[in-house]
Amino acid sequence: MKTKKQGGVAGKGAGRCSGIRSGAGKAAETVALTSESGPAVTHGSGNVYRDMGLPDAEERFEKSILAIYIKRAIGRQGITQQKAGELMGIDQSKVSAIVNGRLEGFSSDRLLRFLNDLGCDVEISVSEPNAERRGRLICS
């Protein structure tokens, strides 16, 4: 059985932290299959926090993406959490919290600055306004 991944990972980006794009913002959809083909399958929206109905789902998702970038940057540099903490100006236990997805107490802005501290370029691009919908934050 082949599956299609919602938010893909692309490229390793020498000297840059790149590769993850958030979901398109649509809600999860349940597709009922016949009893012959097995149980019902839920196709996610690309944002597990939205699919679970958690508050601040978009912010949680974007912060988790930034934490993945931080974890990858540490791994690509081959440094310890202790050394990463020194570069980021935090202690090792906070680095551990970030790389393990415990992001309470870390703002998106702070996570972006940690990426800079680890040598990653962070580019922010603002599109033209769209009167049809609310804007969204996309990590790509």
Image: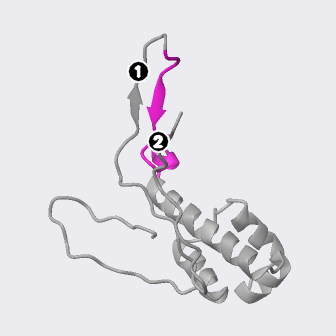
Q: Quadrant of residue 137?
A: bottom left
Mark 1: secondary structure: loop
Q: Position of residue 97 (x, y in %)?
A: 74, 64
What number is the disc on residue 119?
Answer: none
| Residue at image location 81% in from the left, 75% down from the top | 81
Q: Position of residue 11 (x, y in %)?
A: 54, 72
Furthest-top residue in view?
A: 35
Judge by depth and name the residue closer to the eye, 3 or 119. Answer: 3
Q: Which residue is mark 2?
A: 51
Residue interval drawn in magenta: 37-56
Neighbours of disc 2 within 10 Å: few (<14), some (14-19), many (20+): some
Distance (Cα) linking label 1 and label 2: 17 Å
Q: Please, what is the dominant secondary structure of the magenta stretch?
A: loop
| Residue at image location 45% in from the left, 41% down from the top | 44
Q: Give the quadrant of the C terminus.
A: bottom left
Q: Nearer the viewer, mark 1 or mark 2?
A: 1
| Mark 1 or 2, nearer chain start | 1
Q: What amino acid is labelled 1 in the image?
A: Ala
